[in-house]
Amino acid sequence: MGFLRPSAGRATIAGLDCWSQAAAVKRLVGYLPSEFAFDPSLTGAQILTYLGHLRGGVDRSYVQQLCERLDFDPGKRFREYSRGNRQKLGLIQAFMHRPRLLILDEPSSGLDPLNQQEFYRMLREVQSEGHTVFLSSHILPEVEQTCSRVGIIREGRLVEVNEVSRLKHMRQQTVVISFPGPASPEWFQGLPGVAAVRLNRDGRELHLDVQGELQAVIKVAAAHDALSLSTQEPSLEEIFLRFYQVDQPVAAGR
Amino acid sequence: MLRTIWLKTLREYWIAVLCWGLGLGLLIYAMYATAQDALSAGVTQIYQSFSFYGDQVALNTIPGYVTFRVFGTTLPAFLAIWAILAGARLVRGDEERGTLDVLLSQPVARSRLLLEKLLSLILAILVMMLIISLFILLGQLSAHETADYPRALLTTLNVGLFELIFASIALLISQFVRWRGAASGWTAAILVLMFLFDSVGRIQQNVDWLRRLSIFYYYNRNKPLVPSVATNWGALALLILLAVVLIVASTLIFARRDLGGVAFQLALNGRRHPSTVERARALARAAGDPFLRSLSLRTLRAQFTSLFWWTMITLFFVEFLTALIPSLLDIFRKAVAGNAVMSQLFSGYNVATNQGFLGATVFAFIPVALTIFAMTLAYSWSRDLDNNRLELILSTPHSRSRLLGEHAAAVVVASLIPPLVIWLSLLVTASSINLRIDVGDTAAACFSMLPLEWLAAALVYLLATRLSAGLTTGLVSLFIALSFLMEFLQPMLKLPDWLINLSIFHLYGSPITEGMRWGPTLTVLGLAIAVALAALFHFKESSLMARA
């Protein structure tokens, strides 16, 4: 947004330099900061009108439609709004000029569950119109539900960028295999992709942490007359936590 | 200092206590130090025309003179600004910030919380009064008066009681309104009204009863510095009773009302569900507001109230002194001519003319007031940068220089208004009382103030790119204060040219008597433009997070 001067390198949006062409960049962007303040004596309607003018005019009927969808009362003063209402105001002003790119920092914080669902619908709509949404969030189920690509930042560096689906497939999954008789972890140790094998207490069930394809595991399981085999996909939260494990080295930023 | 609520609150006051205590203390000391010279210059004759301002008791003695000049109205009213702000924010400030919720979730009764906060306010006032009483003692010694500390202490305690009452009024009103600004505003209006009741009652014998409605009247019944005035126990008891009643009422109401709400809440507080029509109406109303069309218009609108009051107050001051000229000119001339020190103080002015009088009274202070005014206008920019109010504005497709330029343009327009209004009203008043003044000289005096105003504003913009709002205002205020003191005391200090030329008020000079001084005026203007350009460049190039 041209707020910080780069100490090195450059950032571009739609081919425009974020520092030297900041005004042109901001024309394309709808922005919601994680916490924002405004003149406390202005009403929501005044703030939306003011920001609309600063953006060169916006469609008032669309603004009203957004107010209706998020159940926002624009008649109150900014200082009278609760946290949730301020967030709605922030979302409306970010969406109101139909930007090509939305940059939203913790967009659903403070929203009640009904408004959160409405917000997700709004996100899907702009995505289906071909617009891009950059969403920063600590609520990973929300990211999983709304985003197609995820970037994970650790200690200020981007350590992973990938499709949510690929990220989940690429990462370890837990495979649970049941056998009719006593099982041995040695059957699977050393197979390609198998990171760990644990034996269940009754001795007939094995839990494997497997990375990548499962063909080799299935063959060995079949050879030992396995009764059932189930896989558990890791949630994004688990993937995220693995990146934050102390012993996990930080990869170079991309 | 963080062990109890009252200690924590006291901790928040110590800077204010020191600044106000030392500042007012120095003022009192200076008053004592110059009292004898002023009295021998026959200044009492002039003050006889100022009966609206205070009781004139033993005015020809040093304690009587100091009481009239400082303790009658000036000091209590001036310090009341702080007391009112402190009283209004005592609990309402925490409520606005949302910090009172956390405090009250602790096992502390509401009444106890309020009383603990009040205790620290009382202690802060007491310490401030102790500091001031020491300066009275020093003043007495410097004026070769008998040092009488008990009288000095009693004088300041009387002031302290006055301040406590106004803080308590603000506290009580803050229980009835939702915002501390509103509570301060209403209490300030009461302060002005009380002053007017006392003044009008003193001047007009037939409405003498008005004085009895004023806290100033009961406060001034006791003048501990003046030995000839006996202690009025009745007035003292009445003031103490008033303070107690106000505190008890505030405590009872605070213990019963909703947190964040107001006493005697009648409506549902707008918790109703807004309909589509109401939403559309709110949006349509805002769409018709011309002041939301650009940053400069919005800035002008936001500054309107401040602009109105600054213009009104300076105008009142100018009009009042101009109207006094015919009756005062003779006495003034006589007083100054008879004394070397006074002549020295006003040596730059030709007091024999109407314009000389205007120069010595009006235009010695109005440029300072309007420079401070311009600083407060520009301050809103640095304050908004500090509390992130500009983040969304800066995310709109405008360059930073344009946004800063628009804010500065609004400040330039606003700062033009008071000099223009003062000039026009001076001409109208002068012609209506048949006073001869030069149109060109008065225009020069009024409009030469503009570069000073713009320089102060430009300095705020420049410093705000790197420093916090508080530090920025502090530094610019210091620059203005030093400039004023250097110029005001120059006849005594006799600073070398290179040093005195650093004072913007010296560069302003006295255009009312000397006509337009193009050289110095253009120098300050050039400086203001250079500083403004530097501010634009720095703001354009710096990271927003890099501010201290």
Image: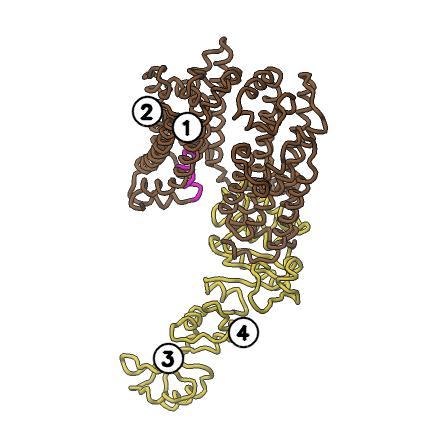
Chain colours: A yellow, B brown
- Tag in front: 4 or 1: 1
Same chain for mark 3 and mark 4? The answer is yes
**3D distance between C-alphas at marks 3 and 4:** 35 Å
User: Does label 1 lie on the same chain as label 2?
Assistant: yes
Query: What residue type is disc 3 on?
Result: Val
Residue ID for mark 2: B148
Tell me the quarter of the image containing the N terminus of chain A: bottom right
- Tell me the crowding category of disc 2: few under 14, some 14 to 19, or many 20 or more residues within 10 angstroms, Cα based: few
Cα–Cα gap, marks 2 and 3: 94 Å
Query: Is residue B52 in sight in this rendering?
Result: no
Viewer-nearest residue: B356 or B492? B492
Pinpoint the chain carrying mark 4. A
> Going 41% across and 86% down the picture, which residue do you hit?
A217
For the record, the magenta segment spans B86-97
Q: Which mark is residue B166?
A: 1
Q: Indicate the position of residue A250 as horizontal and vertical percent values.
A: 45, 74
Same subunit, tags 2 and 3: no
From the viewer's perspective, tell me whether residue A149 is left or right of residue B224.
right
Q: Examine the structure image and report whether residue B89 is included in the region drawn in magenta.
A: yes
Q: Tell which subunit mark 2 falls on.
A: B
Q: Which residue is mark 4?
A: A254
Q: Nearer the viewer, mark 3 or mark 1?
A: 1
Whether labels 2 and 4 belong to a single chain: the reply is: no
Q: Amino acid at mark 1?
A: Phe
Q: Secondary structure at mark 3?
A: strand
Front position among marks 3 and 4: 4
Can you tell which mark lies on residue A176? 3
Q: Say which amino acid is labelled 4.
A: Arg
The chain that hosts pointer 3 is A
**Residue at position x 65%, y 54% from top?**
B399
